[in-house]
Image (cartoon, helix red, strand yellow):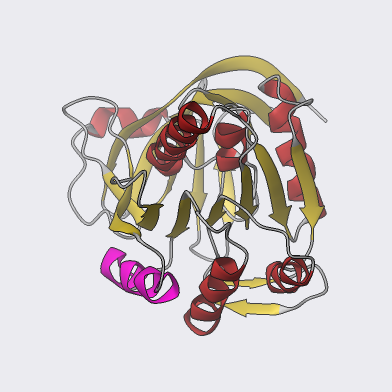
Amino acid sequence: MQTSGTSQNYSLIDSGRGRKLERFGPYLIDRPCACAIWAPKRAAEWPKADAVFSREGGSHWDFRRDLPEAWQMEFGGLKFRVGPTAFGHMGAFPEHAHCWAWMQERLRSWQARAGRRDAQVLNLFAYSGGATLAVAQTGAAVCHLDASPKIVERAKENARLNGLEQAPIRYIVDDVRKFLGRERRRERRYEGIILDPPSFGRGSKQEVFKIEDDLPGLLEQCRDILAPEPLFLLVTCHTPGLTPLGLGNLLDQAMAGFTGAIDAGELALPPDDAQTRPVPSGAFAGWTGRHDAGSP
């Protein structure tokens, strides 16, 4: 496998006319972005793209120069192995960086107050592990779960890139709902839970997940395995039509009986500078326990 050791930062260069132009380390990537209905501001930058992803006539990449299969990138204080995938993803999601910092703040506040570092955090639909790495940097223990063995291996590689190969991270390949049921029967509890469910997906044994049908019950399952005094429950998604208000309402329903605060908002790709427009990229809702109430 060809992998470049070059490591540079992520940046959003421009967006518009249904596209977004991003720099992933040394390479400029042009990808679809349905919500970007405005006009681009930096027309001269777009022809410089090293690779263009399109869904017209079937999903495909147009590589305008030779790219390695994968390379390193830094963003939000973390390193990732990134590269073009068949689905148009690059292996990292910078729009989540604000949530990573929010979780770290909650965990470090708890660690200072409790005089210990062993909070237990569960990361569901964990993909390449951005949230897992952010939590592990605080010294907290993480259970990282995804249905794809290949993606879990990518998460392990990202941990190695960040010097976290010896961190207390437990990697699991499983169906989320079945795993949560087993954790409840085992009476295992977590101080924090993170979930980033897909609009549609399949578990390790082809179990179907549809967010509009399954998210309310999934949040209830998460509530059932929270510690008696939990720190946070954070849900993010990229599903069109599922708004911050809708996510907040679902989280409020799931956390009935616990004392805390809920804040919700848009996930966004951060602009490269003041001249670049941020790009909406999904929604988040975060519940914080009464000792750590605040806004993601």
Q: Position of residue 205 (x, y in %)?
A: 83, 73
Which of the two residues, 284 or 26, is positioned nearer the viewer here? 284
The C terminus lies in which quarter of the figure? top left
Would residue 116 be found to the left or right of residue 235 on screen?
A: right
Q: Is residue 166 above or below residue 101?
A: above
Q: Residue at x 22, y 57 (%)?
A: 37
Q: Position of residue 191 (x, y in %)?
A: 56, 50
Which of the two residues, 272 or 47, is positioned nearer the viewer here? 272
Question: Is residue 76 visible in the rendered structure shown here?
Answer: yes
The N terminus lies in which quarter of the figure? top right
| Start-end of magenta stretch | 242-256
Which of the two residues, 87 or 145, is positioned nearer the viewer here? 145
Would residue 15 be found to the left or right of residue 155 on screen?
A: left
Q: Position of residue 219 (x, y in %)?
A: 52, 71
Would residue 87 be found to the left or right of residue 202 on screen?
A: left
Q: Residue at x 73, y 48 (%)?
A: 151
Q: Position of residue 124 (x, y in %)?
A: 63, 57
Q: Is residue 75 above or below residue 178?
A: above
Q: Residue at x 47, y 26 (%)?
A: 112
Dominant SS of magenta comes to helix
Residue 129 lies in the magenta stretch: no
Which of the two residues, 93 or 219, is positioned nearer the viewer here? 219
Q: Is residue 210 above or below residue 277?
A: below
